[in-house]
Image (tube, helix red, strand yellow):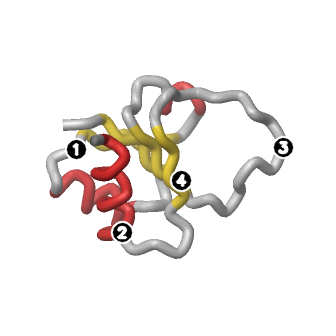
Amino acid sequence: MAKIGVEESLTDIQQALREKGHDVVQLRQESDAQSCDCCVVTGLDSNVMGMQDTATKGSVIEAHGMSADEVCQQVESRLQ
């Protein structure tokens, strides 16, 4: 399955993605996202510095206000 980067604080989403068979990597630093097919972030500190550098070519999903199931659905739809 796909390699999904997930912010450390989103443990429920990490577990849900693992149950669906995805390889889940915790995003602790920029280099963690480089080989991911998709990344899930909280969105709480979205672009604080105003920088626009990209660390991955995969989709980035902002999980703020979404359930673990909704995030999994977003991941599945973006990987197709």
Query: In the rendered structure, which disc, 2 or 3, sits on the residue that comes first in sequence?
Result: 3
> According to the image, label 2 marks what residue?
70
Q: Is residue 75 above or below residue 59?
A: below
- Where is residue 26 drawn, in percent x and y? 42, 43
> According to the image, label 3 marks what residue?
49
Q: Quick one: quadrant of the C terminus?
A: top left
Estimate how packed mark 2 is, as few (under 14), some (14 to 19) or many (20 or more) residues with alpha carbons within 10 Å.
Answer: few
Gap in angstroms between the C-alphas marked 3 and 4 = 16 Å
Question: Label 4 amino acid?
Answer: Val
Q: Is residue 63 above or below residue 59?
A: below
Of the numbered discs in the image, which one, if any, rests on residue 41? 4
- Which of the two residues, 29 or 40, is positioned nearer the viewer here? 40
> According to the image, label 1 marks what residue?
22
- Where is residue 2 drawn, in percent x and y? 26, 36
Question: Label 2 amino acid?
Answer: Glu
Q: Quick one: quadrant of the N terminus?
A: top left
Question: Label 3 amino acid?
Answer: Met
Query: In the rendered structure, which disc, 3 or 4, sits on the residue that comes first in sequence?
Result: 4
Front: mark 1 or 2: 2
Q: Secondary structure at mark 4?
A: strand
Q: Secondary structure at mark 2?
A: helix
Gap in angstroms between the C-alphas marked 1 and 3 = 31 Å
Question: Label 1 amino acid?
Answer: His
- Left or right of residue 8: residue 52: right
- Left or right of residue 44: residue 19: left
Gap in angstroms between the C-alphas marked 2 and 3 = 28 Å
Q: Secondary structure at mark 1?
A: loop
Q: Residue at x 16, y 57 (%)?
A: 19
Of the numbered discs in the image, which one, if any, rests on residue 52? none
- Left or right of residue 16: residue 19: left
- Where is residue 34 drawn, in percent x and y? 49, 25
